[in-house]
Amino acid sequence: MRRRPPPPPPPTPPMAAQTLLLKLLVLLLLLGDATSVSGSGEREALMKFKAAVTADPGGLLRDWAPASPDHCRWPGVSCGASGEVVALNVTSAPGRALAGALSPAVAALRGLRVLALPSHALSGPLPPAIWSLRRLRVLDLSGNRLQGGIPAALACVGLQTLDLAYNQLNGSVPAALGALPGLRRLSLASNRFSGAIPDELGGAGCRSLQFLDLSGNLLVGGIPRSLGNCSQLEALLLSSNLLDDIIPLEIGRLKNLRALDASRNSLSGPVPAELGGCVQLSVLVLSNPYAPLGGSNSSDYGEVDDFNYFQGGIPEAVVALPKLRVLWAPRATLEGELPGNWSSCQSLEMINLGENLFSGGIPKGLAECENLRFLNLSSNKLIGSVDPSLPVPCMDVFDVSGNQLSGSIPVFISKNCLSSQSPVDDLVSEYSSFFTYQALAGFMSSSLPLGAHLTSYHSFAHNNFTGAVTSLPLAAEKLGMQGSYAFLADGNRLGGQLQPGLFDKCNSSRGFVVEVSDNLIAGAVPSEIGSLCSSLVALGIAGNQLSGTIPPSIGELSYLMSLDLSRNHLGGEIPTSVKNLPHLERLSLSHNLLNGTIPDDINQLRSLRVLDLSSNLLTGVIPGALADLRNLTALLLDNNKLTGKIPSGFGNSASLSMFNVSFNNLSGPVPTNGNTVRCDSVIGNPLLQSCHVYTLAVPSAAQQGRGLNSNDNNDTASSDQQNEGGNNSFNAIEIASITSATAIVSVLLALIVLFIYTRKCAPRMSARSSGRREVTIFQDIGVPITYETVVRATGSFNASNCIGSGGFGATYKAEIAPGVLVAIKRLSVGRFQGAQQFDAEIKTLGRLRHPNLVTLVGYHLGESEMFLIYNYLSGGNLERFIQERSKRPVDWKMLHKIALDVAKALAYLHDTCVP
């Protein structure tokens, strides 16, 4: 029998294991000391960051104190598992923004992954040491005032988000950004970066890039074709730069692209049909006359205008994009007919193709765009009728003004207005909200009195529409007490009478505007208008054939701000009920047959700014209380039968800038106010005392048709002798007319060259063929115009055909065809640098239309020859007309009309025209 072995003795730790354990304990102690040292260094770096902050009104860094035991608990500071600072994220709020400098000490936070300080007021240089943070993933310093640039070499190769938008950074966009393999979002918008967009941005490193915003800088050159390699790109925003060339066809390879904004540059060429390959595209902005989206801290940002000038029209492939929601391309020189196939437009919400050169009719296929809420086709060359199946009643904005449309304004088919079925998209919402706001704001500033607010408008103005308007194209659910609406159909051939249906939805709105001036509407103003439309804000029926009297119920329109019934056949007296319109700012009843007196209590209209009662049959005296209206800027009472004195209170009026009581039967002294009551504003009153308000001469009785009766015959005789004695000096009106005429010519020429001389970078263009002899025509004059016909008609620009010369070249008379004369302005080629920008400017000017401006018919642009083609004016220029006044008598009213027309042209160029 075998014996069992004895149990083994208990194990004892070997010497090696004891030594290992001891080393581990020592290492832990050393690591703890190291962490303590590291934490101390990071705390010091954070305190240096705070020290560089000079203002902290919100107390965002109040708890950052050296005595605080744990800096990882400070607001805005996040630490990792080992205690190192991994994120510095200090969020601002209104009134809670940090000011001061960005301390370079943040670069001591070697483990930093997130540095986010957006929308503060940090200024000074962007510390170069920041770019050495190798672990940095997010760098967001947008919305500050930082200066400097981005270095050519970057150590932070792990960056995923780089947002430096809305600062004052400059220099070039480094090619190294294209080598960051994980970069998803790159925004350098609204800075002062210059140079070209590097091709490397579309290199192998852009495979992850989803958002690229370089808008609002001074970038030049073309859009890199390599960007077509950024397969994940969802937003490409390049607006408000100095980019030229074309939109690359390679952009069509971006299957995930949702937004493309190339507006406010100098791009040319056709809109590529290849964009139809961007199957996810929701926003396409090719041009944009509005101020840039989002605002800017850069002083240069707002100076860049939109000079994109595309050739051709909108490709069918673009409107066939299934997810397209915003198509925005106004003033882009697009031409041809509008696309006919809109079968895939169910997502479309906004279309703006206004102020282009489109012809043909409005496509019936647009009726399939059930979600369309904004359609602007204004100022084109569209003809035909408007399809009643278009979803106009559901649109916030429908504008077809300034075309050649005809037929009647249809009664649109009633439809339920669908709520948008499109998914929520912040980028799309940002664009649509911005464009809608700007469109409504621009419309209100140009068409409505101050203080009026709109949520929608429909404009059929300045076409050839006929018939009567029996109802408004507006769905009831679009209004409600929160909505306000404007209907415009002025400048047509509408007839019939004012229908009650024109106001049938008025009382269900917060504000209502009706503008049907300059038509053929007859009959009377509805007697019950006060109850028909109690929320009426503005009513314009000027220039029609209205008769009868102004109904007293007009005084029930308690929200009325503007009433224009001028240029009709209205008679009777001005109803005293107008005193009950507390918000009325503009009252124009001129050029009617009104009689009676001016109501004494009209001074109760405390908001009144403009009162025009001229060219009526009004009698009695001018109420002295009118001088008490503190907001009144224009008072026009000329061409009536008023008697009595001019109230002396007008001599003390500080607000009145336009005053005219000419051609009445006023008597007594003229109030002394050289700024308001001037001699030329009281002419044609035989019983007025001599006008000595200021020293400018007044035309003689022979020249003005009616003389001022003076108690001092020597004054009148002296004036006549001066005018009849061959004195070549000009009086104030003549000087003003000459100055205005010169100003118009100067402004037109300045508009041609302004952009070229103010560009901050030299424009570039591809070499043009010296043999190019193309003539671009903006307006058809009935005969073809070619380079050869111009040269032949001017006798090769022979001096015998020269009719004038100026600083930019000589002007020649040219008979293009028998009886067809034009004026050719031959430009000095050496005076213009940058033919591409010149080409864009001229195309912009070619779209300007105003009855008091000479029309630009066309132009030619070549390397050795440049000329403009204008309508020929056989009567000569205004300056010569005025100079020849001493040789022939000119009716004063004609001079007055000339001055007004010159003023209208200048006002259009200065206030209305946006080239």
Image: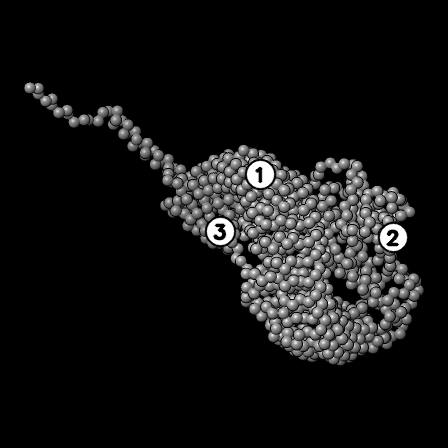
Q: Is there a contact, CB below 8 Å, between mark 1 and mark 2? A: no
What residue appears at the point 65 percent right and 39 percent down from the top-left corner?
A: 221
Q: Residue furthest right?
A: 725
Mark 1 lies on residue: 253
Q: Is residue 567 visible?
A: yes
Q: Is residue 147 visible?
A: no
In the image, what residue type sits under mark 1?
Arg
Seen at 51% across and 44% down, the residue is: 140
Q: Give residue 750's position: percent from left, percent from top.
A: 75, 50
Question: Measured along the vertical axis of the image, is residue 638 above or below residue 126?
Answer: below
Q: Which mark is residue 819?
A: 2
- At label 2, counting other C-alpha atoms closer than 10 Å, the crowd grade (few under 14, some 14-19, many 20 or more) is few
The number of discs equals: 3
Kind of residue at disc 2: Gly
Q: CA distance from mark 3 to mark 1?
A: 39 Å
Q: Earlier in the sequence, mark 1 or mark 2?
A: 1
Way the structure is coloured: one colour
Q: Earlier in the sequence, mark 3 or mark 2?
A: 3
| Foreground of the two, 670 or 348 | 348
What residue did someone put label 3 on?
A: 92
Up/down of 28 relative to 678, above or below = above
Give residue 630's mark: none
Is 286 displayed left or right of 869 in the figure? left
Quadrant in which the N terminus is drawn: top left
Q: Nearer the viewer, residue 379 or 678?
A: 379
Furthest-left residue in view? 1
How far from the left and from the top, in percent, is residue 520? 73, 67
